Image: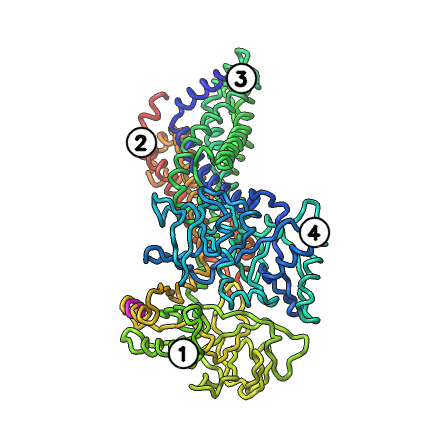
Amino acid sequence: MLKNYFKTAWRNFWKHRSTGFINIAGLSVGMAAAVLIFIWVHNELSFDADEPGAENIYRITNHLAISKNETWVWESSPYQMGVEAKKVMPEVEAVTRVLPYHWLPMYLNINNEFFAETNAAFVDESWFDVFKGRFVSGNAIAFNKNPFSIILSETKAKKYFANQDPIGKTIRIDSADYQVQAVVKDAPANSSFRFDVFVPIAARQSDPQEKKNDSGWGNFSYITFIKLKPGTNIKHAAANLKSIIKPHRDKEDNLSVSLRNLTTLHFENDLQNSGLIHGDKKVVYIFVVLGILLLVIACINYVNLTTARASLRAKEVSIKKIVGAGRKHLFNQFVAESAVVSILALVLTVILISVALPSFNSFTDRNFSLTTGSVYLWAIMIGTLLVTIVLNSIYPALLLSSFKPLSVFRGGSVLKMKDTSLRKGLVVLQFTFSIFLIIGVITIYRQLTFVQSQNPGYDRSQVMSFNISWKLLRGLKDEQQAAIKSALKQSLLQQSSVEAVSLVGLGSIQANDSYSSGTADWDGRPKDFNPSISFFNVDGDYAKLVKLNFITGRWFLPGKADKHNVILNETAARQFNLHKPYVGQRFLAQGETGVVIGVVKDFSFQSMHNKISPAIFKLEEFWSYNYLVKVAPHKQADAINRIEKLWKQTFPGQPFNYQFLDEEFNKIYREDAKASTLMSGFAMVAVVISCLGLFGLAAFTAERRGKEIGIRKVLGASVSGLVSLLSIEFIVLVLVALVIAAPLAYWLMNLWLQNFAYRISIQWWVFVAAGLIAVLIAFVTVGLQTVKAAIANPVKSLRSE
């Protein structure tokens, strides 16, 4: 019986193959887009869930209340905290630490060729016990015994050593040689620890200064994980950790400790900063809805085209009923037809995904693969197929199997008014989704353009930044360090392609760090007023280089006259309730008492997701290792070559790494831009699918009204008049969709815009533009068919009359 169902379904598909191919095209594009979205969603929601024993692995998390309204959350802990936890907490099975090397690239010197690694980490001897590395060759035993060891991911091992055996090979980092002890498989796409290079913490601590720093309880550098025994009371364990660190903190300290399970870390959004990979659950939910919408839009095409052609199959169904076919038999037949179309669409879906997956991986920075071993990917595709079959088949099967033979042979209408209304409603629903996405894309594009084109309040164009690692100056006296930095600065200023140079503690566009105002004090500060403050360590040339604008006062003078003085931004002056004139008021910053010598206009040194925070500038060149270089117009290449040459003369054998501030600034919005691009792509997919359905409906309408068109043409109707007549019905449906989509899009996009402290307002013309785009696309789509019908020879359509 099943074989007969599918045989009949295939025959009917081939008989109406033009409609069938439209259905397949729409379904395959919709399913491919939905599957890509769902595999990404699955990846996000399953982060670290496949790690053996993940349910018992927790990260120590520290919370410092700096004021009544603000608490800082750190993922890092003192190194000693893990040591003590292992000693005194019987519920702890294992402790391990990691220090992601994310502040600068780790340079690997292999045969005198440098490679910049941005996914490197220092780990302790327990790392591969707690987090089970899948070793391709070698093991962790030798890695743990020899501090100067290194483990590479499979991809990096192949990159550096091609087909050679990497075990035993030497890699130089800084001034030390490391031996490759093992190769591990690349971390899966849903792992928070996608490191390519592992170096023992013992190698870092072989430096006496580093070891001394790590032994301090105030040094929160290491991300510490503990593996607890099953059934451990988590709150009790966290309290034990608090008791471990409490004796090493001030009595009035407001530090608390919590434990967060490994599987919950990916969606943290309250950390001060992080060296691990994080996601945004709101974005995930948005894409879940988007995937469902694309699938629904694709299924609406099938439902509409199938029900629209119902009248052409009325006699077929009636005859089958007369000869004894039951409604169940007919229902199963139409479900089989839906399954045939959906399975054919799945074949094309697999082809589309295989073509799109490399670009999708590159864009999302993942490594999904369409192989027989990708169980979850195939499960998602099969699941999508089954959902598609159900959505496609239920209503058409019920409708087609419900025809009454007597009514059909009497010439009555086989479709009720409600069926036609439902079909129109589905077209409206399709275009409601499409218009909503168009409005969303326009709004996101406008917001990102707004934040990237806004005047930040300082000049970051043509400003190059590079850093001197403190390790390069280690062992030198203070005077020697200052002499080297000063000599390099003077050499840079002598280059014709360089306009200005500043030596600062500011490596990028953001402030060095943020501190509670316990490190700052001023006359009139309430005792319970402790706002976050961003500190900038700068030199006397910084303001001129980036062109800061003064409200009052001046910049730092050459020499040490202003060593203890400060300059504020206007937000600091306002929030600190300083009285005018600001200049001359006492101000203590980082233990040094001076006076305010100036106030600069606010400038955007952080993401526009956040409001500008209070900022304090201090004259501090000794602890500044970062150079900002203003490059002359049209001389960027020359400047890079000259600066790199000077670098090699000053630090021979050391790699040169640089950035430009405007590029670094744009990286802040990289994830927003990716989401915008993905949404634009999927919006286009939604519009294409909707147009395919509209095209099919227009073709059927033109075919069904062929005789009417012929008569009107004989009576003198013009081609433009006929096109308007046939198109107006669909254009009205699109306009109805606009009326529904506009308020929904306005509400949801306003919610999204709340993520930005500085944002656009949604203008009326956005809805007009989206409506015009949708109407134009619909008109062109329908027009292709209506023009064809309008210019056809009326004799052909009237020949049977």
Q: In which quarter of the image is residue 643?
A: bottom left
Q: How far apart are marks 2 and 3 (CA)?
A: 34 Å
User: Which residue position holds label 2?
Assistant: 792
Q: What's the amino acid at mark 2? A: Ala
- Disc sitting over residue 90 in the figure: 4
Q: Residues within 10 Å of mark 4 (few under 14, many from 20)?
A: few
The residue where tag 1 is placed is: 480
Nearer the observer: mark 1 or 2; the answer is: 1
Instruction: Tell which circle, 4 or 3, labels the residue nearer the N-terminal end.
Output: 4
Distance in Å between CA atoms under marks 3 and 1? 101 Å
Magenta stretch contains residue 479: no
Front-most of 590 and 715?
590
Q: Which of marks 3 and 1 is nearer the N terminus?
A: 3
Q: What residue type is labelled 3?
A: Pro
Calculate the distance from the C-alpha at mark 4 to the C-alpha at mark 3.
79 Å
| Quadrant for the C terminus in the image | top left
Above or below, comparing residue 193 to residue 404 in the picture: below
Q: Are marks 4 and 3 in contact (CB under 8 Å)?
A: no
Closest to the camera, between mark 3 and mark 1, is: 1
- The residue singled out by tag 3 in the image is 405
The percent position of residue 521, horizontal first and vertical second, equals 61, 80
Tell me the crowding category of disc 2: few under 14, some 14 to 19, or many 20 or more residues within 10 angstroms, Cα based. some
